[in-house]
Amino acid sequence: MLKYAAAKLVNVKGFWPFTFITMLGLVLGYLGPYLNGKFLDFLLMNQSERGAILLALLVASIGMGSAILSYCAGVISIRVTTRLSFSILRETVLHFEKSDYLESCKTDSSYTTQRIVADSNTIASFILNNYINAPMSVMVIPIIVLVIWSVDSLLAVMSVLLLVLYLCVINQLRERLYGALYQKKEADSKYYSLISSQLSQHLNIQACSLYEASDKSLAKGLGRYLPVVLNSGKLTYALSTVDGLFVSVFQAIVLIISGIRIINGSMTIGEYTIAGAYFGILFKILKSLLLLSKSYQDAKASWDRTAAVINGIDNETLKMSNNKFCSLDSISLSNVDFVIPTLEGKQRNVLHGFTYEFSRPCTYCIAGENGAGKTSLLNLLIGIYKPINGMVKLNGIPMSGCDIEFIRSIAMSFCPQNCVAVDEKVEDFLVFLGTPYEIHAEKMDCVPSLNTSVAALLRKQCSMLSGGELRRVYLWSALARTSSVLLLDEPTTGLDSDGRNELAAYIKENAHGQMIITISHDDLMIQASEVLVRI
């Protein structure tokens, strides 16, 4: 985790100014108590008003400088933390998007979203808050001990003994705290997912008056969530209790030893001030180490979950191939077997020994009973799914030897069965899909009704569209790409009769000489296609 985050941190804009300002501010902060103590002794032993004023101005200047630097570092840290968090989040999201689609479907999207965002923020905050403070704290401890030794050797010895004892106690609690924090993160994400699921069913709950069932579901979720939170809370408060105990011990040592020394005349008020202040700083450092241990376990738990996504892609997925086709003339399947997982955790065979070759130019319609594997076949053709047995070839070359990411981006167009309503304007969403309306509108005159309807939707939010309107946006984008392969999964769902007839005419004409593969129960699509493939 540390190596990964540090490599990203040094490339974040503002990192070096933040580092310099923070280190300078810490040095001034550590120097302040020593000057305060010397100032008190100067006042008691000297009568020079000019000297007192100059020393007071020096002490005040250092304090003001430390405060200003602290403010500047805080402002810069917001920018650096946000950028670092985004860098981690961006890489995690991009890796997740390349991960196994079937595996990703097993996890609720709300849970995944909350998990990725929370973990990215936790890792970024931990690194930025500690990459300077922690090393400097460790470096300052022996210096503080030497300063206290110069005041009183017994105080220095006691401080070292307490430090060792403190670290031993922390070490005993560390592993248990990590386990509890990891479980709490998982519980947080799952409870968030439960609430999100309830809110997404607003219409269904209201229409069926399922308020009591919703309440029971939330209560049941709380029953699973609360024990995990309590366990984590107990360990956190145990650490806070240790914190309080050591505060009391430190205070007692300073008061007893310093009080005796002052009475005996072997310690000045200034030295007592220095010893007391640096004891406070020493304890603050110890407390930061306590918080560091806790926050490290928290960040480590977040990192383990993030690393599971980043490192969860096999080498075959990331491997690049020299076979980058800008167009496809054939896609063949040979003795392909495929199974999909069910909600019960079992597997269901959808394709067994399937063999077929799709070629260009030609139009195909895949038909079959619900659950026969039509959508699975389409996902096999574009490499989203991998066959259990058998082989899929592109232009006669096994898909495993092709750069499928490149081929999808250039040679394939796809309109899914389930169109997701993103929270963007249609105009912006078409840009995201790689088909800006103003660039592709002219060549879409072959489907005038579709082109006109999408033009009227450009300023609207996708999330506000009806199912049929959203389908038109996705379909328009798929057709606008005019790639060599066009795959349409139930494309007429939600379309009116004019839209269905227009799409059927487009497929039947196949003016661009494409390999058009549709999945449909619609007779218009079946009749418009040259070949009917039944599975």
Image (cartoon, rainbow, N blue to C red):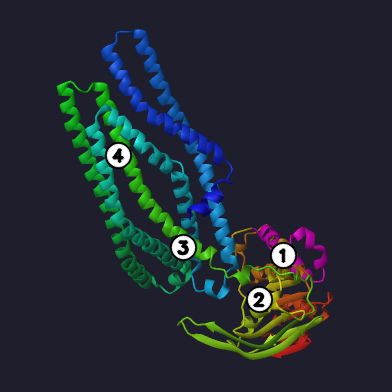
Q: Position of residue 401 (x, y in %)?
A: 70, 75
Q: Position of residue 128 (x, y in %)?
A: 47, 45
Residue visible at 24% across and 37% down in the picture: 157
Residue visible at 80% across and 77% down in the picture: 514
Does the rendering let one see residue 535? no
Q: Amino acid at mark 4?
A: Phe
Q: Amino acid at mark 1?
A: Val
Q: Residues within 10 Å of mark 4 (few under 14, many from 20)?
A: many
Marker disc for residue 305? 3
From the viewer's perspective, is residue 29 above or below residue 478?
A: above
* Residue 436 inside the magenta-drawn segment: yes
In this rendering, the label closer to the viewer, 3 or 1: 3
Marker disc for residue 283? 4
* Mark 1 or mark 4: whose residue is earlier in sequence: 4
In this rendering, the label closer to the viewer, 2 or 1: 2
- Dot 2 corresponds to which residue? 383
Q: Amino acid at mark 3?
A: Arg
* Mark 3 or mark 4: whose residue is earlier in sequence: 4
In this rendering, the label closer to the viewer, 1 or 4: 4
Quadrant of res 411: bottom right
- Dot 1 corresponds to which residue? 454
In the shown orientation, is residue 221 left or right of residue 314? left
Q: Amino acid at mark 2?
A: Gly
For the record, the magenta segment spans 425-451
